[in-house]
Image: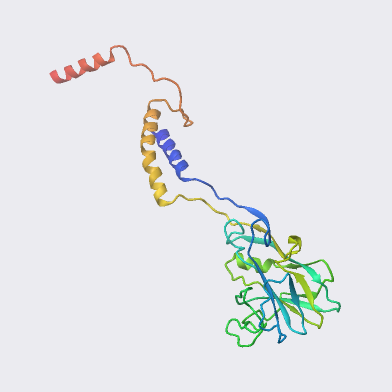
Amino acid sequence: MARSIQFIAVLCLSLFVINGAAVEAGFLTLKQGVDGYTGTRDAFIDSRSSSADVNFGTHEKIVVDGTPTQRGLLSFTDVIRPGWIPLGSTIHSATLTVFTSDPSTLSGHARVYRMLADWDDSTITHDNAKLNGNTQAGIQTDGLEAVTTAIHSGLLPTSGALNLDMTADVQSWADGGDNFGWLFYRFGDDQWDFWSSEAADANLRPSLSVNFTAPATAAVPEPASAATWSILAIPGLLFMRRRFRQGAVAPDGLLSAAPRSPAPPHADRQIVRAASRSRRC
């Protein structure tokens, strides 16, 4: 009887434990138009009177300058989602890479700030960039539109790639935080440009490379599914229990091909005679 109960318990568990915990590690590079990713947004705003109300969301280059004020915007949307980087992932590293298209001829610094307000690359201009209740045109690093402290500051490259560590920002997204991208802010009177997501050469488009570990997940049957499996399992469990009692199931739980021992000769007649004697008594 104990072996029978043990076998039934093991069989029941096998029906409900579909998958154990699974941890998935991955490396993902996001770039507009590559491997199905289309979530890059970028633009720049220009404070000059002839350009203040012009949208620059479809240019091949993002222009960053201090005089006149030209500020670049860049974001990677739809990053945290199933099939890409799952919510709750641990981010080991995240690198933003942009490629210089027009180097600055003067030495100067640029700063990168985290955006705090959403923006639309197809409509934003210098004049209408009044975000999160800000009434001043252009994007300000005032704690409303962008953070007050730069997350990166340094000399701009004269050619090639600029690589920026964005691990903390991407981890914030994976933890459920807002993702509004970044503001590129230039000091000096000579502009610096980098290629946008509209660049004809896909190799020059901005990219975000992320090394991550997805959270552990366990597949648990839905209530309706579990009930269905229970109903379907009952006849099989009863059959297996009978077979176990009859010796057709080995102690290790495997079905045995050994035939049942034959009944003694004339066993049915002996049973009938015994019953008759009992009635006479």
Quadrant housing residue 5: top left
Quadrant in the picture for residue 156: bottom right
Quadrant of res 15? top left
Give the farthest residue toward the front.
Answer: 50
Provide residue 172's location: percent of width, then percent of height.
Answer: 62, 68
Q: Is residue 80 visible?
A: yes
User: Above or below — where is 226 with respect to 267?
Assistant: below
Q: Position of residue 186 (x, y in %)?
A: 76, 79
Horizontal relation, residue 271 to residue 85: left or right: left
Between residues 209 and 215, which one lies in front from this camera angle?
209
Residue furthest to the left in view is 280
Name the side, left or right, on which 163 lies relative to 179: right
Q: Residue at x 38, y 40 (%)?
A: 232
54 in relation to 29, above or below: below
**Closer to the camera, 148 or 251?**
148
Of residues 206 and 218, the one nearer the viewer is 206
Q: Which image quadrant: the C terminus?
A: top left
At a point 45% along the width and 22% down the height, the residue shown is 257
The number of numbered badges drawn on the structure is 0
Quarter of the image with the N terminus is: top left
Residue 141: where, in percent of width, then height? Answer: 67, 82
